[in-house]
Image (cartoon, rainbow, N blue to C red):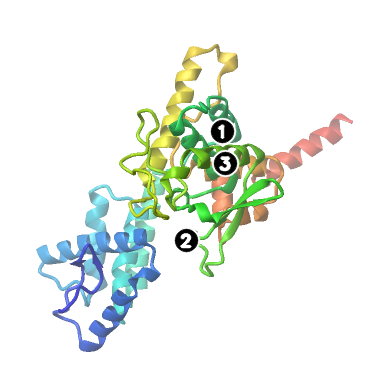
């Protein structure tokens, strides 16, 4: 082949040996336009298809086009026996099916064999008590602790506090937080808004406006002033933990800074996790009545989405408003995130409380 069909760092994951010219042309068309998919989606596609290709190679089977869905089924069973859960196996199935679809091919009996196998594995996990791990809630009380501990003389402290506040105000995904640009910020009536244009559910690319709180709107210009000499386009700068100096990114006379890079999702995860550890240390140093309520597991990059959703539902906001605030397509994720605090799941309890009240009267 003269060019890699679908590549990450120029490594092709597709062999053209057993494909027709029409199927090759379909893949070339996609490869030339692969930016239509998010980078993380491409990486996931590349990784999971490569793993399946390796399996096929060891079993002397052609991975594309796949002649029999039972081959993919056997691969999923093997990965499940190695510890992969149903959620990960669904990604494998999606990736292999996607690469066939891009070539204009179908996997024979995919729905009847692969879908059925995934359901069987999911039911087995339920019987064994295996649950899908959900991010723990980073709530307003945790955010309040962060803001009270803020050191305005430390650039690192300001950046981390600003990130946590914006993630909470906007129910941001960690990928959305990493890729915020300075020019997405607007000041309206004394407060700041951010237009989220990199949301994975925004197919129209129109963006979604996030309205920042008063505290966040005060913290934002302080941070921007401290990093103004950097001239970078990304809002959150890479900062070393020592003294808050910019990490290898020197100030630039060029705008935007040609060396500018976004922070990584690992950095966001670390900021949330370190906050959990800071609150844990605080709780150990004070009496029990001063403790900040804390989940058993550390916070993660999606914890602000969970926490803000729970806080909004607990305050009486309708699920549909929370769905819009979190940029979800359906109510399913809102219900999943808030089922522990959502009163609509306590219908019988509310009914009995009303009866008890009537009886007492």
Point 47% across, 15% down: residue? 284
Residue 332: give x, y in percent of width and height.
56, 56
Q: Position of residue 155 (x, y in %)?
A: 45, 33
Which type of secondary structure does the marked residue at label 2 adopt? Answer: loop
Instruction: Note whether 66 is above or below 223 in the view shown.
Output: below
Q: State which tag comes first along the sequence, 3 or 2.
A: 2
The residue under label 1 is 143
Residue 250 in the figure: left or right of residue 331: left
Disc 2 versus disc 1: distance between alpha carbons?
25 Å
Residue matched to label 3: 221
Q: Residue furthest front?
A: 253
Give the label, 3 or 1, closer to the camera.
Answer: 3
Q: Residues within 10 Å of mark 2 (few under 14, many from 20)?
A: some
Instruction: Using the rendered view, name the quadrant where residue 340 is placed.
Output: top right
Say which of 45 and 143 sits in front: 143
Question: What's the distance in space between the residues labelled 3 and 1, CA to CA?
Answer: 19 Å
Q: Earlier in the sequence, mark 3 or mark 1?
A: 1
- SS under mark 1: helix
Earlier sequence position, callout 2 versus callout 1: 1
Q: Is residue 101 left or right of residue 192?
A: left
Residue at 33% of width from left, 54% of height from top?
88
């Amino acid at each position: 082949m003269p060019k890699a069909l679908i590549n990450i760092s120029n490594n092709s994951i597709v062999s053209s040996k057993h494909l027709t010219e029409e199927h090759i042309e379909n893949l070339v068309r996609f490869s030339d336009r692969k930016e239509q998919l998010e980078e993380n989606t491409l990486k996931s596609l590349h990784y999971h298809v490569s793993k399946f290709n390796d399996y096929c190679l060891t079993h002397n089977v052609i991975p594309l086009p796949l002649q029999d869905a039972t081959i993919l089924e056997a691969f999923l069973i093997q990965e499940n026996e190695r510890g992969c859960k149903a959620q990960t196996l669904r990604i494998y199935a999606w990736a292999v099916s996607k690469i066939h679809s891009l070539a204009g091919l179908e996997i024979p009996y995919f729905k009847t064999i692969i879908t059925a196998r995934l359901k069987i594995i999911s039911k087995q996990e339920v019987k064994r008590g295996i649950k899908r791990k959900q991010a723990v809630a980073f709530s307003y009380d945790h955010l309040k602790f962060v803001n009270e501990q803020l050191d305005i003389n430390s650039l690192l402290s300001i950046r981390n506090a600003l990130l946590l506040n914006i993630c909470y105000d906007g129910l941001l995904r960690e990928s959305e937080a990493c890729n915020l640009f300075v020019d997405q910020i607007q000041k309206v009536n004394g407060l700041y808004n951010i237009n989220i244009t990199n949301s994975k559910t925004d197919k129209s690319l129109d963006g979604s406006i996030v309205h920042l709180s008063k505290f966040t709107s005060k913290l934002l210009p302080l941070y921007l002033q401290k990093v103004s000499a950097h001239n970078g386009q990304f809002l959150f700068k890479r900062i070393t933990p020592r003294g808050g100096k910019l990490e290898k990114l020197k100030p630039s006379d060029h705008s935007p800074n040609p060396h500018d890079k976004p922070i990584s999702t690992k950095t966001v995860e670390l900021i949330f996790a370190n906050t959990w550890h800071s609150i844990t240390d605080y709780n150990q140093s004070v009496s029990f009545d001063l403790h900040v309520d804390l989940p058993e597991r550390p916070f993660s990059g999606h914890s602000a989405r969970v926490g803000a959703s729970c806080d909004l539902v607990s305050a009486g906001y309708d699920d549909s408003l929370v769905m819009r605030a979190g940029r979800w397509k359906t109510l399913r994720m809102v219900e999943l995130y808030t089922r522990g605090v959502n009163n609509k799941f306590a219908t019988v309890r509310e009914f009995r409380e009303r009866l008890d009240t009537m009886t007492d009267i």
